[in-house]
Image (cartoon, coloured by chain):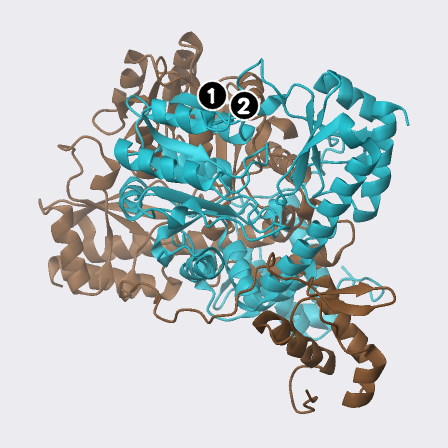
Chain colours: A cyan, B brown
Amino acid sequence: MHLDENSTLPFYQQIYEHFHRGITDGTYPAKGKLPSIRGLADELRCSRNTVEAAYQLLVQEGYVASKPGSGYVIQDIRHLDNVTASRDASAQSPQQAPKTRYDFAYGNLQAGTFPALTWRTITDDILLSVGIEAADTYTDANGEWDLRAEIAWRLSMTRGITCKPEQVIIQGGTQPSIQNLLCLFNPETDLVAMEDPGYDAVRKVLEHSRFNITYCDVVSQTHQFIKDVEACDARLIYVTPSSQFPTARVMGTDMRERLITWARKNDAYILEDDYCREFRYLDRPLPPLHTMDPDRVIYMGTFSKSVSPALRMSYLVLPPALLERWNETFTEAYPAVPWLSQVVLTRFMKEGHRDRHLRKQQTRNKRKYETLVDALQRTMGDRIEILKNGTGLHVLVNVLDGRSQDELIEAALAHDVRVYDTNRYWVRKDHPLAGCVLVGFSAIEEEDIVPGVEALAHAWFGE
Amino acid sequence: MHLDENSTLPFYQQIYEHFHRGITDGTYPAKGKLPSIRGLADELRCSRNTVEAAYQLLVQEGYVASKPGSGYVIQDIRHLDNVTASRDASAQSPQQAPKTRYDFAYGNLQAGTFPALTWRTITDDILLSVGIEAADTYTDANGEWDLRAEIAWRLSMTRGITCKPEQVIIQGGTQPSIQNLLCLFNPETDLVAMEDPGYDAVRKVLEHSRFNITYCDVVSQTHQFIKDVEACDARLIYVTPSSQFPTARVMGTDMRERLITWARKNDAYILEDDYCREFRYLDRPLPPLHTMDPDRVIYMGTFSKSVSPALRMSYLVLPPALLERWNETFTEAYPAVPWLSQVVLTRFMKEGHRDRHLRKQQTRNKRKYETLVDALQRTMGDRIEILKNGTGLHVLVNVLDGRSQDELIEAALAHDVRVYDTNRYWVRKDHPLAGCVLVGFSAIEEEDIVPGVEALAHAWFGE
């Protein structure tokens, strides 16, 4: 062995690597001894501290034991994991779909939105701080207290929702939230209802759950939805009152009142998904359903739109009676979200970063929304109908000349524009929005909106 | 307004705060104008760049719009979230249970185990790197490809498991894994089986799922378990063959062969939970069941023991036929784990940090295991029976004088020692291990083990 002065590895690590390799490949067999620290330091012409640092590392990792009187003895390492072969380079990542020039996707956010530098500063600070034993433990299954308190406080400030921190349950997204919520109900006796059309990811969860599902028509006639609700005896109904997904309709005051009355009469719970309430561009919306009856409404919120979908963080606000059932049901549960994500998000909110970040997003999305709607109207006029309500991150565009969604999407793709089908949101096959596609503006770059819409108009109407 | 040179806030931020406050509280109403940049800079005796920076911030956040020719116009901010009131200080965190001097808990890790500094360095690096658009999107619902490839490669190196990266599904822990897995089966026709005693967190999930459950006896007689299995027609069975939880028994070769034969004959799947295979202290264990029939065995692993339980990360390896069913079922699903956790863990593994970290943990846990078993034998001798097999992070201690678990736990607590009940793992009430408590060594400090066991011996036997 000799030490290489030109290596990027410090001396102690070179010594460590030498013995590590030798012990792993059998050159230095178990029960043998390492050279004495003084002897090796003299031989290598380095300091004893250097040799000792290398030996300490070998001791810590179990290759060697330091025995008083007999020096450093090589250990039997068969119980240790030793990964020596190289990785299989053939495991290639699957091919990605080619990118479209103008992609009006919904859900993903514009590249660069995630506040990476602030997130980094806070993460740094937390991981450097002393006393982070939470990092080594199973923390509160319902979420970190400070985060739940912060969310409860913000809900009261911005939504008029009154709830205690214990009612706020941190979850890893809409789907697991509903999966868990359904554990509080009984598929043999309890019917579940949702909107048609409605959020397909939620419908999937309900379908997997083996609950019987009733679909309530939100489109046919003004009060059809509430009539459908009143005609069923569901125990739980999923709704999106502040901006119905995907039609962007706002549930009116009379419908809200009838819904609450129905829930009280039927001993039912209303799951209010307020997925995009941060993004409203015209006026103050109606207060959440939750404010009308906190005992009947489960409020659900997400950080996917306002911080990042890759964060996988959302929350439920449970009515007291359901909270009790939840805590009984999930006595052996573990947190749904990593501790680190939770504490970083808490600081991100408490220190005001989220307010600033959200205002930027709100302002940008308002501009994007207005730009999109203007461009659609300017280029396509009365050949389309735009379903919108001044909220959210998408509009629906209904093309009135009888073409199907598939035809419209294919025509757009031929001009390097991607818009999305809405049939997936329907249970009914013969629905009245057969020529209606989804045009999202969360992911597309702001300056691409106008040329994208122009390309779309050209693709559809040849102009 | 004046600029405070002694403030910790930079000048531009003082200017920003002044206008922010004024616009929010109505002092500066909508449609009014901000002073010109030049005028304000002169008035405040600061540079124009300073004023411009403040104005840019106000523009970005939507308080002000910059109109060519008419300067900076204050906007209607009713659509923006504005949180101004202070937090309610009364929302106090709930009281924590008082700490016990010697806590032989299972599951939590020793404080300081989490490799916080390495985690920080990697996170830093990732959040500083360009091209992290994944941070703004819904990434692969089955997990990041590089992580899945790394896990597949390591499984082949350390476990002899042959699988492709696409078969590895990243999940947020044992419970959601099983919840999702059950979506591939039918509660009306498919019976599910598990061990008795067995992991209570898994039993809870099965109970919530409305599947019919059969419990197979792992304790009564040597082959009782496999007889119970062979007598049932379950479609899925949960087992812990390398170290049965909580009894620490190893499933013998003949039992393994009969289990595989049974699964083939009954078209059943075996869910092999290899929760603590990283920690084995005596000899090489048997290869995983998965190696005996990769088409019949679902392999499940976790990072809770080897990195951190607060990380909430685990994985499933699905047989090809089940993978197909999984992908069909979860077409609309989202990732179970935050993108950032996944990419940091990938680098942590690829750069060799995990190997080093794991070897340290393996070495320390081996010492702790030996220290614990030695101390138990030395202090309590043949008044106890120790159920152990040289793996894992706990042993069971069976006290043979007829005292109940409650009596033993209370006696220990009176001497400031905490050990844990095992009744919770049983479905049967009249089981043969009535005086058997769990003594974990994952969380307790190494130097507390001997005095903790001595205190326990004193508490139980008054010596």
In the picture of the structure, the residue carrying the numbered disc 2 is B326
Question: Where, quadrant-wise, is the C terminus of chain B in this rendering?
Answer: bottom left
Question: Which of the chains bears the disc numbered 1?
Answer: B
Question: Which of the chains bears the disc numbered 2?
Answer: B
* Residue sitting at x 69%, y 56%: A363
Q: Residues within 10 Å of mark 1 (few under 14, many from 20)?
A: some
Q: Amino acid at mark 1?
A: Leu
Q: Earlier in the sequence, mark 2 or mark 1?
A: 1
In the displayed structure, A92 sits above or below B439; it is: above
Where is residue A10? Give x, y as percent. 74, 66
Q: Amino acid at mark 2?
A: Trp
Question: B441 left or right of A364?
Answer: left
Q: Is residue B92 visible?
A: yes
Quick one: A252 or B39, which is closer to the camera? A252
Question: Where, quadrant-wise, is the N terminus of chain B in this rendering?
Answer: bottom right
* Residue sitting at x 61%, y 49%: A279
Q: Secondary structure at mark 2?
A: helix
* Residue sitting at x 38%, y 35%: A259
In the picture of the structure, the residue carrying the numbered disc 1 is B184
